Image (cartoon, grey):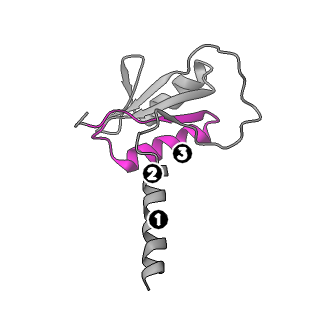
Amino acid sequence: MTPLIDVVFILLVFFMLTTRLLPVDYLELSNDTSQRSTTAGDPHPELRVEADGRILWRDTRYSLQELMPALTAAGVSEANLETAPEASLASFTHTLSALDNAGITPHWKRSGTPES
């Protein structure tokens, strides 16, 4: 019984030491890296989902129905999607789905938590 406890303890220590505790700034939502380029171009537009579900873009708040035509008219094909700490998960996933359905590749940016 003692060797089994030793093995479990060693595994526990191993996983504790190898786990990443720092948050990731940008999380790619697609795994396809074949289309990625190493050259730097214009930065992607920053979209922020607010607590009320509206999206902030270029210092203007849009509803989701207003934002999609504005992004399409501006020729946006990729965007960084940021969430306010108070924003609900439902607002985030609804916005993420709408961007994906409109042909805009979203990248999620984790914003700071209220404690940080």
Q: Is residue 24 magenta?
A: no
Image quadrant where residue 30 sits: top right
Secondary structure type for disc 1: helix
Q: Which residue is mark 1?
A: 10
Q: Residue at x 61, y 37 (%)?
A: 102
The C terminus: image quadrant: top left
Q: Residue at x 40, y 30 (%)?
A: 48
The N terminus: image quadrant: bottom left
Q: Earlier in the sequence, mark 3 or mark 2?
A: 2
Rendered location of residue 41, percent (x, y): 64, 14
Q: Is residue 24 above or below residue 1?
A: above
For the residue pair 110 and 89, the one nearer the viewer reads as 110
Amino acid type at circle 3 is Ser
Q: Which residue ends up furthest to the front in the rendered image?
A: 2
Q: CA distance from mark 1 to mark 3?
A: 42 Å
Q: Which residue is mark 2?
A: 17
Q: Which residue is mark 3?
A: 97
Side (left or right) of 67 relative to 59 = right
Q: Earlier in the sequence, mark 1 or mark 3?
A: 1
- The span picked out in magenta is 85-113
Image quadrant where residue 112 sits: top left
